[in-house]
Amino acid sequence: MTLTVREALLAFRRAPLLSALSVTTIAFSLFVLGLFGLVAVNLRQALQGVAERVEIVAYLLPGTPIETVTTAEQDIEAFPEVASADYVSEDSALARARRELVEFRDLLRELESNPLPGSIEVKLKPGYQDAAHVNAVADRLRGFPFVNDVRYGRDWVEKLDRLRSLAAAVGLVVGAAFAVVAVIIIGTTIRMAVLQRSREIAIMRLVGATDGFIRRPFLLQGALKGLLGGLVAVGLSYSAYVLINRFLISASFFNGVQAVAIVGFGTVIGLVGSLLSVGRHLRRV
C-alpha cells in the first residue's frame, strides 16, 4: 500500500504541468457544477419557503356547533400529513379581513351582518406539501358533512411541483454532463501517463508484476486528482458565494454534507476516469 501511494505521488513529480492542468480542469468543471449547485440550493430553500405557505382552508356551514369543530380539529390533526388544524371563527375571519384588507376597511365596518364563514385552516408537514398529498387531504376534508367548501390554490400548488421537478431534472442533466467531461479529462491524463511509462511497465511485467499491481498507482493518481479538483472547486465556490452575498443578493452556501459530497464526487469521477482508461491502455503497452 505504501508503495502504491508513493508511486501515485511520484506521478505528480514526473509530470507536474500535466498533473496541474488536469487538476485545474477538473476543478473548473466541478466549480461550474458548484455554481449551479449554489443556485439549486438557494432555489430549493426559496421553494421550501413557498411550500411552507401551502395551506388548505375548509369553510364550514353556518351554525356548525363548536363542539363538532373541536372534534373535527382533533381528527384532522391525526392525519399523517397534517402539522396543524386551527379553527377560525366568523368573528375572527371578519377581524382579520378588516386588518389585512385595508382598501376595504370602511366597507367592512359598515356591514350589518358578518358574511364570512368560519373555517379550519390546515397546514401540512414538510414532505407532504406536494400536489398529490394536498389533493388527498382536501378530498378527505370534503368528506366532513359540515364542510361547505375546500380551497387550497390547486394551480399554484401544481406549478410549485413543476418547478421542483424542473430544478431536479436540470440539476441531474448538468451534473451528468460535467461528470462525463471530467471522466474524459481524467482518462486522457491517465492514458498519457501510461504511455509515458510504457517501458517501465513492460519491465515490471517481465519481473512478474500483475496488472492489478501496475493499475493501483494509476487509480490512486486519478482519485487524488479528483479529490484535489473537488477541494479547489469548493474553495472557488465559496469565493463566488462571498462575492454574491456581498455585492448582489443574500444567499446560502453548501452545508458540510453537501461540500463533502462535491469533494467525494470529484474523487469518484477521478477514480472512474482512471478505471476506464488504465485497463484499456495497459493492454496496449
Image: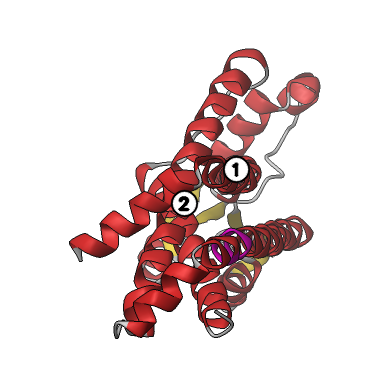
Q: On the rendered image, what quadrant is the C terminus found in?
A: bottom right
Nearer the viewer's eye, disc 2 or disc 1?
A: 1
Dot 1 lies on which element? helix
Please say whether residue 155 is visible from this viewpoint: yes
To which residue does mark 2 refer?
A: 225
For label 1, the crowd category at 10 Å Cα-Cα, with few meaning under 14, some 14 to 19 and many 20 or more, is some
- 152 to 30, vertically: above or below: below
Q: Give me the residue at 75% from left, 31% from top.
A: 111
- Residue 244 in the magenta stretch? The answer is no
Query: Which amino acid type is marked by label 1?
Result: Leu
Question: Mark 2 or mark 1, which has the lower sequence index?
Answer: 1
Q: On the rendered image, what quadrant is the N terminus found in?
A: bottom left
Q: Give me the residue at 79% from left, 60% from top.
A: 155
Looking at the picture, tell me which residue is in the foreground, 121 or 111: 121
Say if mark 2 contacts mark 1, CB within 8 Å. Answer: no
- 22 to 162, vertically: above or below: above
Looking at the picture, tell me which residue is in the foreground, 127 or 175: 175
In-image side of 231 versus 38 (left or right): left
In-image side of 159 versus 172 (left or right): right
To which residue does mark 1 refer?
A: 21
Dot 2 lies on which element? helix
Which colour assignment does the render follow? Answer: secondary structure
Picture coordinates of residue 250 (x, y %)? 58, 23
The magenta segment: 186-191
